[in-house]
Amino acid sequence: MLECALNINEWDKTKQLFTLPSVNALLEDENVQAKTADMYLALHEERFGEMESKYAQASQLCLKAWSLLPSAGAKRNKERQLQHFTRLYEVRESSQLLIEAEAHLTRQTVPDIKSILKTWRHRLPNNYEPLSVWNDLFHWRFNVYDAFATKFSWTSPATLASLHDR
């Protein structure tokens, strides 16, 4: 339910799910998916100060899970772990982008985000990965760009277009 709520941007439902004992148990059991969902929610609520510690915890859990995988076989499990690393890094990068946006907002200037967007363009899933992986990634990036564009709605549309098209 948590994953579904995140995928359809139901932030109130996501917040409500974090009050459930079962989800809290996942967080306490150091479940990587629950920690990642917690990062998404913190980013949506603009609790940027928490992002680095949440990222450190989740990445340590991913590394631990990676080290527990058998060296032979388990190809699909390794692919899932790599996909999870990518998701974590995307959320971290998104928080840095929105932090930079906040800093520029106070000065009424527009930041240069071309380097991050260029990195995003080059860091795509592999061609053999399921469509759901591509969909999740582009859905997340669309949400981040939308949040970014909303912050700079006071600028002209041409200025936002110069940053990059969706």
Image: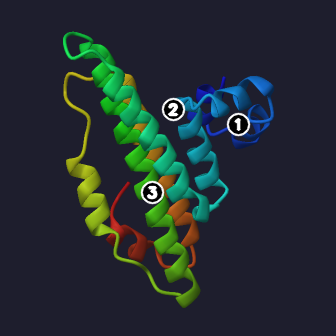
Q: Position of residue 89 (x, y in %)?
A: 38, 48
Q: Residue at horizontal 40%, vertical 57%? A: 93
**Residue 134 seen by the camera:** no
- Viewer-side label of 2, 1: 2
Q: Residue at horizontal 60%, vertical 59%? A: 50
Q: Residue at horizontal 33%, vertical 64%? A: 164
Q: Is residue 119 above or below residue 86?
A: below
In the image: residue 148, left or right of residue 8: left
Q: Secondary structure at mark 1?
A: helix
Q: Amino acid at mark 3?
A: Ser
User: Which numbered disc covers residue 65?
Assistant: none
**CA separation, marks 1 and 3?**
19 Å
**CA separation, marks 2 and 1?**
16 Å
Q: Which residue is mark 1?
A: 14
Q: Amino acid at mark 1?
A: Thr
User: Which sits earlier in the primary sequence, circle 1 or circle 3?
Assistant: 1
Closer to the camera in the image, 86 or 7: 86
User: Which sits earlier in the primary sequence, circle 2 or circle 3?
Assistant: 2
